[in-house]
Amino acid sequence: MRFLLLFFVFLSACSSYKIKGPAGFIQIKGSDTLVNVVQYLAEEFMKKNPYIFVAVTGGGSGVGIASLINKTTDIADASRRMKKKEIEMAKKRGVNPYEIVVGYDGIAVIVNKNNPVDKLTIKQLHDIYTGKITNWKELGGEDLKIVALSREVSSGTHLYFKEHVVELGKKTKDEFASSVLMFSSNQAIVEEVTSNEQAIGYIGMGYLNERVKAVALARKENSPYVYPTTEEVLAKKYPLSRPLYMYTNGAPKGIIKKFIDFVLSKEGQMIFKRIGFVPRIIDKNVEAKNN
Amino acid sequence: MSKLKTIKEKTIEFLIHISGFLIILFVILIFLFLLKDSLSFFKEYPFFKFLIGKKWLPISDNPQFGLLPLLLGSLYVTFFALIICVPLGVASAMFIAEVAPSSLRGILKSLVEILASIPSVVLGFIGIVALGPWIKKIFHLSTGLCGFTGSLLLAFMALPTIISISEDAINSVPKSVKEAAFGLGATRWQTLWRIILPHASSGIIAAIMLGIGRVIGETMVVMMVTGNSPVMVHSIFEPLRTMTATIASEMGETVRGGLHYFALFSVGLILFIITFIINFLADLFLHKK
């Protein structure tokens, strides 16, 4: 804080402009899971640094990573790791992706509040999304057709779900059934599940609210059923949990570093918690660190 | 004085010519651009496999780019939108041009224009929150986000185009023809149905063609309300995925120069060719005399 103050004083002393503090423009693109929390972070950050403007857009992790490679964004939010192919492609274009874990997330599987089904195994979820189970009756629910909802292919959540549920951790080569509905945002999935008793969808934990019901998940038939809560994700008991990332081109510098430091600060991490995500364990390190 | 006038006129004529040629140039450039990127796609992915492939799995380890589900999705939605909007549009045009009293005519015409100015994202939103759940209830569907919801909204969007162009066509039927019909003792309905409509048919067909062009190219509405499942469509009451929605929702995540990126351009090329043919046919009918 004192450093910040000194920095302000230094800048105001040496610049002939009336700008008090660092100035500039940061473009952030990517994960739709992260877009709300990053927007919140950006607003808080801009309150402290009135001359730095931070623009946040969603679209999906794929969009963020593609933009980083195409050099049209400063920071890419991602709810998945960059693929080897993407890193190679980036290096070919002179972009050097630098990975920062900013928090953790559980992927919540949601159903309508009137749906009696409240627990599923990963295998059952797999069968729903690959089209092997098509009626709620088979899962102990009513005799209704299942309407499975998914995120679009540009979503990191889609890729995570594909890898861990549809492909059962790369054990099978199954694909999403073509009858699965594709949505371009988490919010749209929440809307459809709220109004449709037959629907099932998956979203980032931060989007859970009282209008939909989260289902407890179990890794195997005889393992315990776990709800997506902060504690269970931190303890790695919830089967669908994952880190959330930000990527920059090379180690962050200047105002970008300032923003990343804010994200990883105690205050920034509390925002993750408030929105419904799981913060990194913050007492260990606050600095940006490459894993 | 007169010399100055000729210079002025020549310049203006020249500028108008340039504008005309520029437009043509732009269309050709867009086409070449699409063609170039599509060709780089077909170098790596066989054209035939693209055209008749039944699976659209762009991000798999073994990606498949089958156009068929997307093409069918677009055609289905367009076809049903037309079934709804063509009778409605032509009938409204007939009403506005021939039946309505002149005081009502003005109001109707401006209302049709207002209809044209509703942004598609607003219609899509209405589709999600109101029309979709309603259709789900009426037809006992498993979800309201299906092709039919899309068709209804698209019909709504194509109506203004069809109404205003058909109305122009009906208005341009010579008065003498109409009077001759009345003179021979035809009723108003007989005149309208047997004399005026056939006379205006080429204009009406052109209106329908332009309506098709509008519907098949529409993106936002179909992306929001059709559910976007890349299935081989069997029924309009199922979720489906159109070519336009695919391009819009996947373009953002592709890396420039990747196979997926080029695949989307190929979809764009097919769409361009379809709309080009439709507009060309519309033009043919519009100038048929």
Image (cartoon, rainbow, N blue to C red):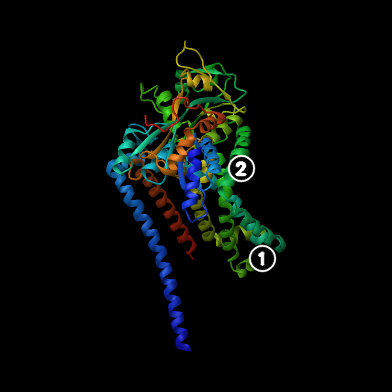
Q: Is residue A171 left or right of residue B109?
A: left
Q: In which quarter of the view is residue B22 placed?
A: bottom left
The 10 Å Cα crowd at callout 1, few under 14, some 14 to 19, many 20 or more, is: some
Which residue reaches farthest bottom? B1
Q: Position of residue A129 (x, y in %)?
A: 46, 25
Q: Which residue is mark 2?
A: B126
Quarter occupied by residue A173: top left
- Chain containing mark 1: B
- State which mark lies toward you, 2 or 1: 2
Q: Is residue B257 above or below residue A165?
A: below
Say if B59 sits above or below A51 in the image.
Answer: above
Q: Quick check: can you spot residue B92? A: yes
- The residue that mark 1 highlights is B182
Tell me where residue A210 appears, x and y as whole percent. 62, 27
> Which numbered disc flags the more N-terminal residue, 2 or 1?
2
Q: Amino acid at mark 2?
A: Ile
Q: Name the outermost residue toward the left.
A: B43
Circle 2 residues within 10 Å: few <14, some 14–19, many ≥20: some
Name the residue located 48 percent from the left edge and 89 percent from the top edge. Answer: B1
Label 2 and label 1: CA atoms lie apart by 46 Å
